[in-house]
C-alpha cells in the first residue's frame, strides 16, 4: 500500500516536470513515469525527486554574489542563461558576432 502511494506521488511529480527543449527524445518526465511503476520504489526516492523539482538544495545553499559574479567575468553566468534561453527559443547569434566576440 505504501508503494502505491509513492507511485501516485511520483506520477504527480512527473506530470509537473518541465520539458527539456534540447532533448525532445529523452525526457526526465518519461523516466519518472516509468520509475513510478517500479516494484521497489521507495518514499526516499520520491522525496528526492520532489526536492529536485522544488530546487530545495538551491534554496538551502544559496550562492553568494561573489560566486555568481566573479571578478574576472562578472556577467558570465548572466550570458550563459541568456544564451540558453535564446537557444531554447531557436534564436542564435549571427556568425560574425560569434567570430568577433560581440555579445549584444
Image (tube, grey):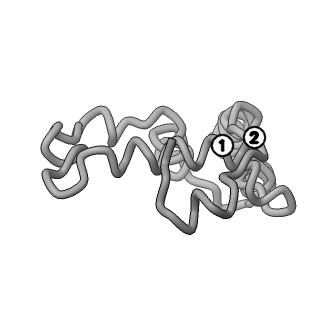
Q: Residue 19 versus residue 73: which sits nearer the camera? A: 73
Q: Where is residue 24, by image quadrant?
A: bottom right
For the point 49% across and 42% down, which residue is it? Answer: 47
Q: Position of residue 40 (x, y in %)?
A: 65, 61
Is residue 1 in view from this perspective? no
Q: Position of residue 96 (x, y in %)?
A: 63, 62
- The answer for how far apart the CA atoms under marks 2 and 1 are is 5 Å
For the point 24% across and 46% down, which residue is it? Answer: 74
Label 2 crowding class (10 Å Cα cut-off): few <14, some 14-19, many 20+? few
Is residue 38 in view from this perspective? yes
Q: Quadrant of the N terminus?
A: top right
Q: Where is residue 68, by image quadrant?
A: top left
| Helix, strand or loop at mark 2 | helix
Q: Up-down: is 103 above or below 97?
A: above
Of all residues, the one furthest to the bottom in this rendering is 99
Q: How many marks?
A: 2
- Tell whether 66 sits left or right of 91: left
Q: Position of residue 58 (x, y in %)?
A: 33, 40
Label 1 crowding class (10 Å Cα cut-off): few <14, some 14-19, many 20+? few
| Helix, strand or loop at mark 1 | helix
- Tell whether 40 sits left or right of 56: right
Q: Which mark is residue 16?
A: none
Q: Position of residue 39 (x, y in %)?
A: 73, 60
Q: Are marks 2 and 1 in contact (CB under 8 Å)?
A: yes
Judging by the rendered image, the residue that carries numbered circle 1 is 86
Q: Which mark is residue 89?
A: 2
For the point 57% across and 63% down, which residue is it? Answer: 98
Amino acid at each position: 500500500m505504501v508503494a502505491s502511494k509513492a507511485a501516485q506521488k511520483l506520477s504527480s511529480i512527473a506530470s509537473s516536470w518541465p520539458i527539456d527543449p534540447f532533448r525532445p527524445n529523452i525526457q526526465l518526465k518519461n523516466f519518472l513515469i516509468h520509475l513510478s511503476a517500479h516494484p521497489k520504489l521507495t518514499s526516499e526516492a520520491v522525496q528526492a525527486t520532489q526536492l529536485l523539482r522544488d530546487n530545495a538544495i538551491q534554496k538551502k545553499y544559496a550562492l553568494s554574489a561573489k560566486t555568481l559574479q566573479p571578478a574576472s567575468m562578472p556577467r558570465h553566468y548572466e550570458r550563459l542563461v541568456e544564451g540558453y534561453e535564446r537557444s531554447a527559443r531557436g534564436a542564435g547569434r549571427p556568425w560574425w558576432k560569434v567570430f568577433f566576440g560581440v555579445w549584444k
